[in-house]
Amino acid sequence: MTAKSLLTVRGLAITAAGRAITTGTNLEIARGETIAIVGESGSGKSLTAKAIARLLPPGVSATGQVSYDGIDLLALPEREMQQIRGRRLSLMLQDPFTMLNPLMKSGLHIAEMLRDRPEFRDRAALNGEVARRLTEVGITDPDVAERMPFQLSGGMSQRIALAAALARDPELLIADEPSTALDVTTQAEIIKLLKRVQQSRGMGLVLITHNLRLAFSTCDRIYVLYAGSLLEVGSARAVEADPFHPYTLGLLLSEPPADKRVPKLIAIRGKVPRADEVAGRCAFADRCDWTKDACRAAAPALAELAPGRLTACIRRREIAAEMQALRGSALAAASPSAAPDSATRPIVRAASLVKDFAGRAGRVVQALKGVSIEVRPGESVGLVGESGSGKTTLGRILVGLETPTSGRIDIGGFDASDFSAMTSAERAATRRIIQMVFQDPYSTLNPRHSVRRSLTEAIGTIGRFPRSEIDARIAELLREVGLPEYYAERRPSSLSGGERQRVAIARALSVKPKILVCDEPVSALDVSVQAQILNLFKRLKLELGLSYLFITHDLAVVRQIAERIYVLYLGEVVEHGSAEDVISRPQHPYTKRLIDSIPR
Amino acid sequence: MTEHVEATQPKERAPRDAIPPAIVIAFIVVAIVVICAFFGGSIAPDSPFTQRLEIGDTPPSAEFPAGTDLLGRDVLSRVIHGAWTALIGPVVVAAGAFAIATVLGLLSGYLGGVVDSGIMRWVDFMLALPGPLVAIVVVGVVGGGYWTAVAVLIILFTAPDTRIVRSAVLEQRPRPYIDAARALGVSKTRILFVHILPNVLPIILAYVVLDFAFALVNLAGLSFLGLGVEPGTPDWGRMLFENRTILFTNPVALLLPAAMVILTAVSMNLIGDWLFARFTRQ
């Protein structure tokens, strides 16, 4: 492997403002090989990629050795590095919408890379080459080269970006979360495309991702990065079959399975630490079930336990059997979703909802085209769709943040079709039935209000209470969402994403609602935290008898929560039924496409 | 229970950036002006009004560190007393414009629709007017001197400030925490003043400081044209006008008030820019 190694990284340590981001990463990739760097937010995976390409932002510096085909990249003068970037090593970034220059036609992004080659001096030859390059990334319509970036969809932009990254025929492509910002079905297409291009060109590919399943299905070898340290290295197949590090196992188990429903996900407790918080000890020690004093005594080094299998867990040999048992029990556990009780009266019933928005140039955009759904008491209903399907609009209409153009809504016996037409008493009563949890944990709380202030305000909307009663209720709410009581004095800026989402749930629960509309409540969270929040939703449902309308693009998530599923596509319900039926026996072609795009 | 959250250490605060030296100097200049404005009577070596027609204008000497003007009045004492009109007018303008602009901007940005269109068209109209010229005409026709000028400036400055408040509000409005408050049934007034205002306040305050600097220069200009303070009042703009004829016998009488106007305005500008950068970086 080392003989024809294309890129060798030794002891790459990245620091920003005196703070460690990564602590000595070793990577290796051969020509034509695909490796994945898997990590959660704050693991340092993106900065590692940027450090290799010498594109670190100002204030961030790297030490160590990056040897590319025998050239020491970190020691290279910037001029010579420019010759390497693009030609020999190319970088493709996450967000397709900001990656292209908004003032340049999409074809120009590719032509720009070809300009300095003598054979493309001629305009016709250049245009021909651009068209050929676009065909390689699956764009056969020659018109696309003439379009501006804002006229392209996310998937299309990502294809253009890929074509531009490939234009100088690099031997190595580093793709940083190339599919994360895209819709599920588009994600699968882009990954397939990347893999195809990599194979046909025999190019090296470094895929940076937070998604372990995606890494397993696309890559030869996996590097698991956590809080700046590599915890496990091994071939994709071997790691998938038997992860050596408790963190890798935890990640695997945290990911909700799409093919069955488990009573409770096995979550990693706590939250992802910063690299400098865990210096000098095992980075995962605080969250690991098998931690011993030795784990905290020194930072464990990666050790080779089997050929090509490295792990930083010093207790691997002792705990191997326990880890396997845990995995086995998690795989075996499955609970059928309870059959919805069709006899009871729905708590929310929406009939033929239509919502029009004013589009560009006076055109009307129909976000919802006559959608009807029902949620019964104690039932969890999934609303699945991609961006543009109207799922968020539907949720916002139900809680009164938008008013439908036409259609009827009944919430707990109140006519809630138009919140502004209700009497204020009715409106207040409706709001005590239905509440909402939002997607983005970072702006869901007022940054200037403490947790106590946010919750006090929410409690205050249902009536006036003495101070002592409010304090008792706040303590109760925090306990319900699994936060310690002293968190009441915290401000959002000192909370992690998962903790903020818990506070947001507590805020929604403060009026004792019967149903929560949850709009992608876990999609912005790290995988290990996602499982904690999903478990919280499950527990609250049992303890408080809550109903959920769970809005998501993620079928695996919805499988764990919902008993019934509605599939929304371009503003219409194209399929609905029990979660079991819809996922195992999809009828509509769009549902089938959604299910096919889950990496396995 | 696996879904239990570990106690986390409160994050240490990021070390505050040291205040750059230029800003320190700016704060010192402003502090001196403020002290002169409030304690001018006890600091000044002489009364600003005592005339000594027998000596007339004299260059700086041991008795009069900044010399005397045409009527033999002590220039240094007049500059120190002049700090009052240099401070109070701009403060009133900045505070008044800030208060009106905040209310208009909040309403315009949050309510949208007709309210927004109405307020914004008024702002457009005000921005199309040549500000200083309007001030000259209004004060010239209506009279009333300094305080009329202050009132006119408040109205003129409200327009651009309203726009700034509105754009800051528009940035906050689509955030989920506002939606969450609406879904809970929190009243509009409460959302405006308890949720949105504290989040846009830092940006508004930074602009208020800039308003002060502009008002100072404008008021000094009006006083120079004889449209500001009453004749005889110690005022920096007025002194520029009165002492322009003695530039060659006692240049300090002209240069000192001019320098004070420039120093104070530049200092406030620097402070405003610095505050703005600090608040918007977060």
Image (cartoon, helix red, strand yellow):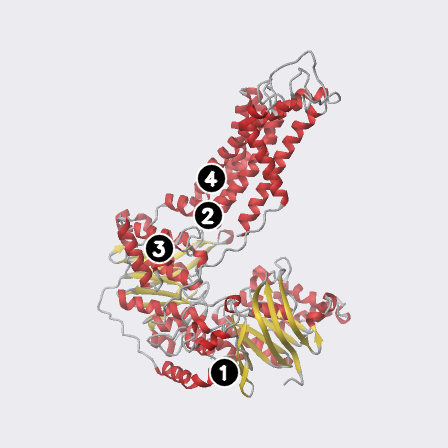
Whole-percent x and y of residue A54?
A: 66, 67
Q: Which residue is mark 3?
A: A406
Which quadrant holds the N terminus of chain A? bottom right
Distance CA(mark 3)–CA(mark 4):
37 Å
Residue B199 numbered tag: 2
Q: Which labelled disc corresponds to residue A239?
A: 1
Which of labels 4 and 2 is toward the front? 2
Residue B102 circle label: 4
Task: Respond whether the residues carrying marks 3 and 2 are from the same subunit.
Answer: no
Same subunit, labels 4 and 1: the answer reads: no
Farthest-out residue, left: A343
Residue at 61% x, 34% y is B264
Mark 4 Cα-neighbour bin, 10 Å: few <14, some 14–19, many ≥20: many
Q: In the image, is B81 to the left or to the right of A397?
A: right
User: Chain for mark 2?
Assistant: B
Residue A471 location, x and y as percent?
30, 53
Q: Amino acid at mark 1?
A: Val
The residue lying toward the viewer, choosing from A282 and A129, is A282
SS for callout 3: strand
As helix, strand or loop, the secondary structure at mark 2 comes to helix
> Which tag is nearer the camera, tag 3 or tag 2?
2
- Which of B17/A34 is in front? B17
Q: CA distance from mark 4 to mark 1?
A: 59 Å
Q: Residues within 10 Å of mark 3 (few under 14, many from 20)?
A: some
The local secondary structure at tag 4 comes to helix
Query: Which amino acid type is marked by label 3?
Result: Ser
Question: Is residue B99 toward the left or the right of residue A168 in the image?
Answer: left
Judging from the image, mark 1 belongs to the subunit labelled: A
* Amino acid type, callout 2: Asn
